[in-house]
Image: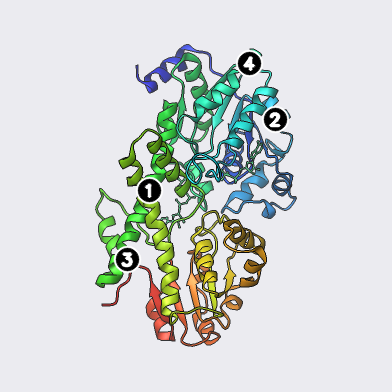
Amino acid sequence: MSLNKKNRYFRKKTERMQVKNICCIGAGYVGGPTMTVIAEKCPDIKVTVVDLNQKRIDQWNDGDVNNIPIYEPGLSEIVKNTRNKNLFFSTDVNKAIEEADIIFISVNTPTKTYGSGKGMAADLKYIELCARQIAEVAKTNKIIVEKSTLPVRTAEAIKSILDATGNGVKFQILSNPEFLAEGTAVQDLLNPDRVLIGGETTEEGIKAQQALVDVYANWIDRDKILTTNVWSSELSKLTANAFLAQRVSSINAISELCEKTGADVTEVSKAIGMDKRIGPKFLQSSVGFGGSCFQKDILNLVYIAKSYGLNEVADYWEQVIIMNDHQKNRFSRNIVRTLYNTVASKKIALLGWAFKKDTNDTRESAAIYIADNLINEQAQIAVYDPKVNEDQIQNDLNYLGTRADDENCQAVNTFKNAYDACKDAHAIAVLTEWDEFKSLDWKKVYNEMKKPAFIFDGRNILNSNELSEIGFTVYKIGVGKN
Ligand code: UDX
Ligand code: ADP
């Protein structure tokens, strides 16, 4: 019997579980928005989001919802509607675990920075700590849902920790990967392309899957809720991100060729994207993809493939990352070359630090690496991002460990608006596609810059004809000289 058939069978045959309490461990970019939308759509379910980080929880509970720690369009309004009604943020992890019927694990899984798998495998220490805490605290049967992006077969590891408690409490582990993209998280959660729920193919497993299907069915069409086995679900998440990232690297590879041949990558994207088999999305050439998922998930895929001895598979996917690194590096090299082979002591303004627009997330943002490369060339960096603050920018650079923290501090200044950042600059690099950059008074910017005034549009969002008319020397990714 197929899983979906089995589902229908058990929906009739088995008693349905009534979910009253949901707990989510981890109040980050995934846990926070996801639980907010569940609370909004399931008013009869109490949703508690817990985190060890007191500051983060305080921010989620801030009287002014504009101060919640994550910026996502539409999120603060929903938090306002639901908070302290059926949505709660707390640091009391044990209490929330005890009360919950379903526990989502939504903690961070960074790439390992030590030991075996360093630089590739996901670090599961936070997941393991969660599993151990649940095992210690739970007194009633629970459904545990993997929400963090995890390597294939992590559910098995969680299960073995939980089953070792020996206190009679039964756990069902489900994999329910998150497909939301930052910047559009609320819309993606309200109206997802699909929801994927992987579970064991036993009667208990299917009953647990069904309980979670019923939660999502409060607002999502049941036809869009897929049930699979755990491993298919885990691997689907990595595969989806690898495919999306591969499209970006593919068009970025073509962008370099465009620059040499006189083609225009935006024209090429449009031409190929109109082929229904290819489709128009994720063909926007850029300074390089960032974000917490793409690189991490591909490295994970590469690590898993290598660990099974599948070297050709590993090499194939690794190339997506190699291409992305190349795109970032060639962008900063081009700035140096264009500015007469030296940027030493020159002010370079970076517009945008977030890894994409409409988010304050900077993880793996291309801007970090562009700034790092330019600081190595002794440039003076000026940054403006509408949602990223100075501390975050310094932390991102310090985390790379390229130089001492105080050297980063001296090399980088952060500004509260684009005009101040660009004043007296030799060159501007647009690194995030924030809408406000399109409508800047570029004449004013030009008048206040050093001449010749260069602009490097790393997102192809500016009107280069208008800029050239003003007097700028414009470089766009993937646009060759005819
Ligand atoms: C991604 C997946 O889209 C999402 O399904 C998954 O849950 C998490 O990872 P996210 O990283 O939030 O989401 O953003 P996404 O829109 O995918 O963009 C990732 C990076 O690729 C950004 O830096 C973006 O600027 C870049 N990108 C995207 C391009 O350079 N060109 C494109 O055409 C699309
Ligand atoms: P993501 O993008 O996956 O949501 P984040 O780093 O934004 O990742 O959020 C993960 C959150 O999980 C962090 O706020 C971190 O403090 C929290 N966290 C990690 N381990 C635990 C734990 N054992 N118990 C509670 N919270 C945890």
Please identify, in this view, whether the residue under mark 4 or under mark 3 is nearer the observer.
3
- Choose between 301 and 308: the one closer to the eye: 308
Tell me, yes or no, whether the two marked residues, 4 and 1, touch with CB atoms within 8 Å. no
Q: Nearer the viewer, mark 4 or mark 2?
A: 4
Viewer-nearest residue: 89 or 369: 369
Disc 1 crowd rating (10 Å Cα; few below 14, some 14-19, many 20+) is many
Closer to the camera, 56 or 127? 127
Give the Cα separation between the discs numbered 4 and 3: 58 Å
Q: Marks 3 and 2: in contact by CB < 8 Å?
A: no
**Ligand 1 lies under 8 Å from the Cβ of mark 3:** no
The residue wearing badge 1 is 318
Q: Position of residue 313 (x, y in %)?
A: 32, 41
User: Would you place residue 416 above or below residue 238 in this image?
Assistant: below
- Give the alpha-carbon distance from disc 4 to disc 1, as whole Å: 42 Å
| Residue placed most toward the observer, 472 or 183 | 472
Q: How far apart are labels 2 and 1 at the CA level?
A: 40 Å
Q: At which x and y percent is residue 239?
A: 39, 40
- Using residue 251 as the reference point, say whether residue 31 is left or right of it: right
Q: Amino acid at mark 4?
A: Val
**Percent position (x, y) of residue 68?**
67, 51
Q: Mark 3 — residue?
A: 256
The answer to the question of whether label 4 and label 2 lie on touching residues, with beta carbons closer than 8 A, is no
* Between marks 4 and 1 in the image, the one whose residue lies nearer the viewer: 1
Q: Is there a contact, CB below 8 Å, between mark 4 and mark 3?
A: no
Q: Which mark is residue 169?
A: 4
Query: Where is mark 2, residue-wise?
Result: 96
